[in-house]
Image (cartoon, rainbow, N blue to C red):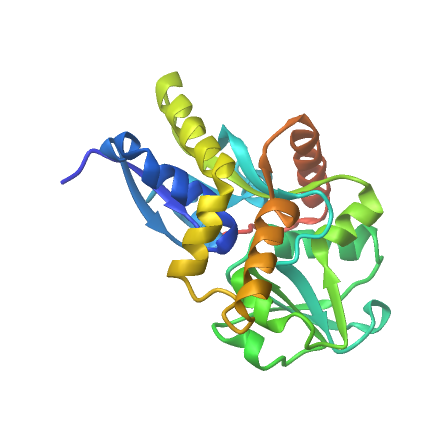
């Protein structure tokens, strides 16, 4: 039986800098037990208290204001995020049905906000099942994470949801943050912030490790693969939860609450 604090992260490429920082700060592992899950599962684990800290979708805060963001870091984008896409057979104005990624919470909530306030459309939403992205059974689908890298460029219409948010609202978008369902002392939070900052400030080592030890984007040649991963981790994804991102997150949650009429989690 362990008394360690449970931390749940997401095993997507965008999380690798956080993962690298934790690995290099082994003293943090003296009091942390780490596991991995999808973003949706991270939110569920927080709500059901089967983990204590998670890199969880920001949308969970719309229904659980008792949860708290506890570090200075997040997963966000200033504009184009590249790994949160609406893939479609039709133009936006002609879409009637959308399959929603079962791994997602913030991104599918972002789509609903954009549909309501930006595109001003009502569509039928379908919950995706495992493998849904391989056989589109509706007009469009939202897919997140590393699976998008192999899908990009294969659909007649592709909409980057981070870019669409920025174009309409003029704000960065925060997809996830380190959220907790319990209190932590200042030293524990400091240790987490130090570990995460280390990973982000050693991004070249993260990229080298990714190229050597994973198959991500391995359909590209070596130079293209390195260039793509580098651009994604240094340009598409932004990690510091600064004041502009805090304000944008609060604005998004306000919009989400205005359209959400049923619980996000079962």
Question: Residue 217 appears at what percent x and percent y?
Answer: 52, 67
| Residue 266 in sight in this render | no
Q: Is residue 124 left or right of 148 when viewed as pictured? A: right
Q: Is residue 218 left or right of 151 when viewed as pictured? A: left
Q: Is residue 181 above or below residue 96?
A: above
Task: Write the residue at 45% across / 52% down.
Answer: 208
Quadrant of the rendering where the N terminus is positioned: top left
Task: Write the residue at 78% across / 46% down.
Answer: 166
Residue nearest the viewer, comparing 60 with 186: 186
Question: Residue 203 appears at what percent x and percent y?
Answer: 50, 42
Q: Is residue 248 above or below residue 122?
A: above
Task: Write the residue at 44% across / 67% down.
Answer: 215
Residue lying at the far top in this picture: please name it: 186
Residue 85 appears in which quarter of the rendering?
A: bottom right
Residue 123 appears in which quarter of the rendering?
A: bottom right
Task: Write the residue at 83% across / 72% down.
Answer: 91
Residue nearest the viewer, comparing 39 with 217: 217
Residue 161 appears in which quarter of the rendering?
A: bottom right
Q: Is residue 36 left or right of 238 when viewed as pictured? A: left
Residue lying at the far left in this picture: please name it: 1
| Residue 219 in sight in this render | yes
């Amino acid at each position: 039986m362990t008394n360690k604090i449970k931390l749940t992260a997401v095993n997507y490429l965008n999380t690798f800098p956080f993962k690298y920082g934790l690995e290099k700060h082994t003293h943090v592992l003296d009091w942390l037990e780490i596991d991995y899950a999808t973003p949706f599962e991270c939110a569920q684990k927080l709500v059901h208290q089967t983990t204590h800290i998670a890199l969880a979708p920001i949308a969970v805060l719309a229904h659980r204001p008792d949860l708290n963001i506890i570090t200075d870091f997040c997963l966000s984008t200033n504009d184009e995020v590249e790994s949160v896409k609406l893939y479609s057979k039709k133009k936006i104005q002609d879409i009637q049905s959308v399959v929603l990624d079962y791994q997602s919470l913030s991104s599918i909530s972002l789509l609903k906000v954009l549909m309501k306030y930006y595109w001003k459309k009502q569509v039928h939403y379908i919950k995706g099942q495992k493998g849904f992205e391989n056989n589109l059974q509706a007009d469009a689908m939202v897919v997140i994470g590393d699976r998008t890298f192999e899908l990009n460029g294969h659909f007649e219409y592709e909409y980057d949801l981070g870019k669409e948010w920025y174009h309409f609202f003029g704000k960065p978008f925060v997809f996830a943050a380190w959220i907790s369902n319990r209190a932590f002392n200042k030293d524990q939070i400091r240790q987490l912030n130090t570990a995460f900052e280390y990973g982000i400030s050693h991004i070249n080592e993260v990229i080298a490790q990714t190229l050597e030890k994973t198959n991500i984007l391995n359909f590209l040649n070596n130079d293209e693969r390195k260039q793509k991963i580098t651009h994604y981790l240094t340009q598409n994804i932004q990690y510091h939860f600064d004041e502009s991102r805090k304000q944008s997150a609060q604005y998004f949650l306000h919009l989400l609450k205005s359209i959400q009429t049923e619980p996000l989690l079962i």
